[in-house]
């Protein structure tokens, strides 16, 4: 295992390290208490574990799935909105979708399973 220790590391330097076989990069500074708490919550989160088991980039896919399959149909029913066709989902076939703030790509990945024959544009600043 290769460990690189630095206080200020640019993203390009990290990519260069990964390209030469670096498998773990550890920063030299101590993590804050809130960061430590967040890491502990992430380790216990069942959706994070499920996403890792399924090879998904994040747990966000499950959030969009819940919105698409549960909350949106309930909203249109509550508001009395008439939707033509049998598909009463937020994401439908042949839609054009723009995912702003797309990294790490969980929503775009889920959207690609729902928007058949449509277009998905994912944009993020890295």
Image: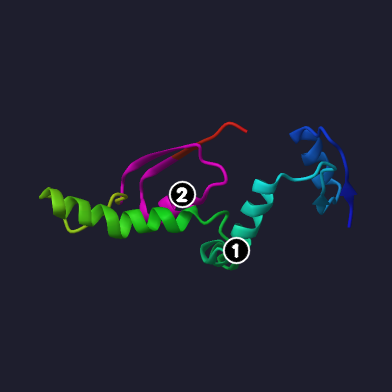
**Disc 1 designates what residue?**
52
Crowd class of label 1 (few under 14; some 14 to 19; many from 20; radius 10 Å): few
* Residue 103 belongs to the span the image colors magenta: yes
Q: Visible in this render: residue 84?
A: no
In the displayed structure, 31 sits above or below 73; it is above
Crowd class of label 2 (few under 14; some 14 to 19; many from 20; radius 10 Å): many
Q: Position of residue 56 (x, y in %)?
A: 56, 59
Q: Visible in this render: residue 92?
A: yes
Which label was assigned to residue 30?
A: none
Residue at figure coordinates x 58%, y 54% from the top left: 57
Q: Position of residue 101 (x, y in %)?
A: 50, 37
Q: CA distance from mark 2 to mark 1?
A: 15 Å
Which SS class for mark 2? helix
Are dots 2 and 1 in contact, CB under 8 Å?
A: no
Residue at figure coordinates x 42%, y 42% from the top left: 120
Give whichever of discs 2 and 1 has the lower sequence position.
1
Residue at figure coordinates x 74%, y 35% from the top left: 11
In the displayed structure, 19 sits above or below 44; it is above
In this orientation, which residue lies closer to the viewer: 45 or 97? Answer: 45
Boundaries of the magenta span: 93-120
Which SS class for mark 1? helix
- Position of the C terminus, as image quadrant, is top right
Quadrant in the picture for residue 95 = top left
**Disc 2 designates what residue?**
107
* Residue 25 belongs to the span the image colors magenta: no
Quadrant in the picture for residue 43 = bottom right
Q: Position of residue 7 (x, y in %)?
A: 84, 35
In this orientation, which residue lies closer to the viewer: 57 or 92? Answer: 57
Residue extending furthest toward the front: 33
Q: Is residue 95 left or right of residue 42?
A: left
- Position of the N terminus, as image quadrant, is bottom right
């Amino acid at each position: 295992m290769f460990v690189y220790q630095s206080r200020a590391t640019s993203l390009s330097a990290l990519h260069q390290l990964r390209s030469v076989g670096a498998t773990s990069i550890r920063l030299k500074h101590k993590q804050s208490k809130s960061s430590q708490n967040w890491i502990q919550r992430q380790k216990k989160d069942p959706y994070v574990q499920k996403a890792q088991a399924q090879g998904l980039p994040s747990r966000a896919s499950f959030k969009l799935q819940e919105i698409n399959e549960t909350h949106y149909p309930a909203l249109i029913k509550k508001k009395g909105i008439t939707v033509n066709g049998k598909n009463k989902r937020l994401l439908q076939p042949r839609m054009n979708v723009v995912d702003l703030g797309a990294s790490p790509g969980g929503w775009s990945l889920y959207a690609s399973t729902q928007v058949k024959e449509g277009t998905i544009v994912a944009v993020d600043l890295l």
